[in-house]
Image (cartoon, grey):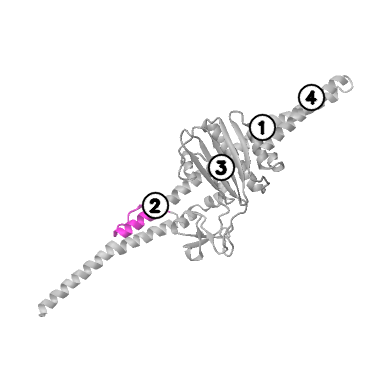
Amino acid sequence: MSEASLIQLCYVSGVLLVASNAWFFFRVLRPLRRLSYQAEQIRQGDLMSFERHCGGIPEIRVLRRAMAGMSGHILRTQEQSSAYADRLADGQENERKRLAHELHDDTLQSLIAINQSIDLARSWMRSDPDRAAEMLRLAREQAVESATNLRNLIGGLRPPALDELGLVAALEMEAEKARDVAVSVNVKGTQRRLDEARELALFRAAQEVLTNVRRHSGAGMVDIEVTYRSEAVLLTIADDGCGFVPPAHIGDLAQAKHYGLIGLQERIQNLGGSVHINSTVGQGTKIEVALPLQESQQPDHLVRDPVCSALLEPQQVYSSLTYAGETYYFCCPVCQGAFQKDPLLYLVRSPHLKGCEGHPVT
């Protein structure tokens, strides 16, 4: 090979090497650096970071779109959780106002009237004993009425029948209160008392569903069935109302600002249970609640991501951070970024989702 040919070959090889390096830099290395920067932005709480294009080869673009989808899912969950937390706060405030109104307009006024009757009876005790006796009788009636109203108010906060007689009896009493719809309660299996948390969760679930039936379904009949099994209790509530198209996930109801069923699901899931909705337009709705009698135990070596609730083996943990003296573990930068942006959102929504180093998740 002549010297000129050798020089030409080296020149071509050099050009190809520069071109390939340039292609690798602009199509692979720089897009990967951009992707890495976007991941760091996610970790710092910018959930929209992956919406910005980073270019590169198709594989990198597919990876960016996948990460954008993950961050979008976290963002939607965060927005729904925030809306749900606001709704809970509003509900609590409205309940406080209702209680204050009832205590002031009913109980307080009754006590004032009783006091006035007693004062009048005392003043007439010698001059007009019959009139004094009538005022004392009136005071007694007012006291009985006030006690009845207070008992009803307390029963609305926590039904005494639930503590004294159990779940089925409380459901039967709730069914008797329904005036605009016929409600039946049936039991399968051997009826028995459950622990306080489970009985209350199932009773509140039935209350919420009955409220929705009265408000939205136009049903004339509701069947409540409680099935006792050795390992679980099943609560099924079926109506003959108008039905609806159920969402793929109950959490999607937050978009329509229907938070009752979301709260129902969270209460049941906190006890290890599940909620399923079966409904067809024009054919009624059936809601099934399954609640295990014993909370499922998780292996001691697993930890839980507080954002997406994923159970993680130690080798699956992406990172961890300490907040308020507790250590939290994350499966990906998206979850870590969401938590860092607003940790209280996830601690308020799911206070049981805390994984501490050396302790099992419960």
Q: Could you tell which of marks 1 and 4 lies nearer the N-terminus?
A: 1
Q: Could you tell which of marks 1 and 2 lies nearer the N-terminus?
A: 2
Tag 1: amino acid? Glu
Tag 4: amino acid? Leu
Q: Residues within 10 Å of mark 2 (few under 14, many from 20)?
A: some
- Magenta stretch in the rendered image: 46-68
Q: Residue 69 carries which label?
A: 2
In reply to whether residue 239 is colored magenta, the answer given is no
Of residue 133 and residue 272, the one placed in the foreground of this image is 272
* Left or right: 208 in relation to 52: right
**Label pair 1/4, CB-CB below 8 angstroms:** no
Q: Quadrant of the N terminus?
A: bottom left
Residue at which label 1 appears? 102
Q: Residue 88 carries which label?
A: 3
Tell me the element at label 4. Answer: helix
Q: Could you tell which of marks 2 and 4 lies nearer the N-terminus?
A: 2
